[in-house]
Image: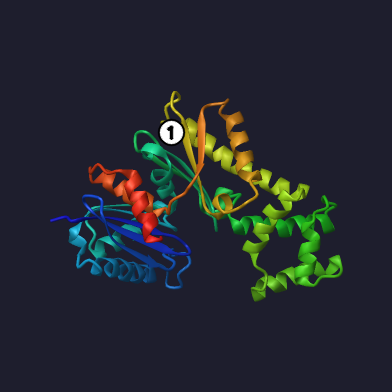
Amino acid sequence: MSKFIMGIDGGGTKGHLALFTLNGELAATHAWGTLNHEILEGAFVQLEDELKRFIIGALDKVGAAADDIAHTVIGLAGVDTQNQHEIITEIFRRIGLRDFTLCNDGYLGVPAGCPGGAGICAINGTGSVLTAIDNDGAMAQLGGIGVISDDCGGSGWYGSQALSAVYRELFKYGNETTLRAILFEKLGVKHRNDYVDAVTSALEKETLDIEELGRLVFTEAGAGDTVSVGILDKSAEHYASCIAWFAKELNFADDKPLYVTLAGSGFVKEKVKILPNQIEKRVNDMLNGRQTEFNRLDTPPVTGAVLWAFKNAKIDIDAADIKKAIALAGL
């Protein structure tokens, strides 16, 4: 007999699991490390081992087994293609889960942040991905696979743009940028001819933090560096174009607000708000002023997995109560 609802958020940095009773009481939570097969050295083989220990460890806390779960929603980083989805689906079946929904972790931001569980989630964290679930339950994902999907977001992308901007200034008559002086100091560079060797050497030795460089783009943009502002403008165009595509291609009623949730450190934690402001402006222009409501995700993504699982199990639950319970658990 089913006793629990389970939600899993497995990202590139950490994993979270929340287990609720069918009447909405939090039974257990569990935290883990990376659950992205693209990062794990053992790829899918190691992922299966990590997931098995992760899930069984959580169930052991309440003396439960996989058969006790009514429904599970699992959002995992690295579920970007049909082939990846099929491989990982089989992993969960071997672990013993029966009724579950598997998707890219980016989808969890929709039920977590959009009223009614329909809308768009734009993620700007380690990487960039946008997801949508429309009024019919149809799902779509844009980005998340780097240069192939022309991702213009994520800390790594901003960092690489900083390096490129300085190169353009030095060797292509590009616009001057305050990023040059910062990078020269970090790398101990005195002359432009030493820049390329210094950068490549630092990258090979992993002494140059690309994510830190990405954060500098936001800081310098806020201080008025036009080149850094231009990098954020390019990123804003990327996010806004994807949001507009979802709005036009999926079933979102024109007479109701289009909900867009912004998630990831680049949106939630970053103090410089140039990027989200530019995205909102561009979306407004692209959609001819259509009513669009933006918000920043204020609950862990695993909340979305839990709410979605309750919905799929056809169990009515108060979303506010679920969010409060997860917040009190400290996830």
Image spot of residue 298 (x, y percent): 47, 49
**With respect to residue 123, does 190 lie above or below?**
below
Q: Which residue is rendered at x = 29% and y = 70% of the image?
A: 57
Towards the viewer: 72 or 26: 26
Q: Which residue is rendered at x = 61% and y = 49% of the image?
A: 152
Q: Which residue is rendered at x = 35% and y = 45% of the image?
A: 320
Asked whether residue 75 is in view, the answer is: no
The number of numbered badges drawn on the structure is: 1
**With respect to residue 284, does 40 lie above or below?**
below
Q: Which quadrant is the N terminus positioned in?
A: bottom left
Towards the viewer: 68 or 128: 68
Q: Which residue is rendered at x = 43% and y = 27% of the image?
A: 256
Report the residue marked by disc 1: 250
Towards the viewer: 71 or 148: 71
Give the residue at the far bottom of this rendering. 205
Horizontally, is 3 left or right of 85 in the view?
Answer: left
Image spot of residue 17 (x, y percent): 34, 60
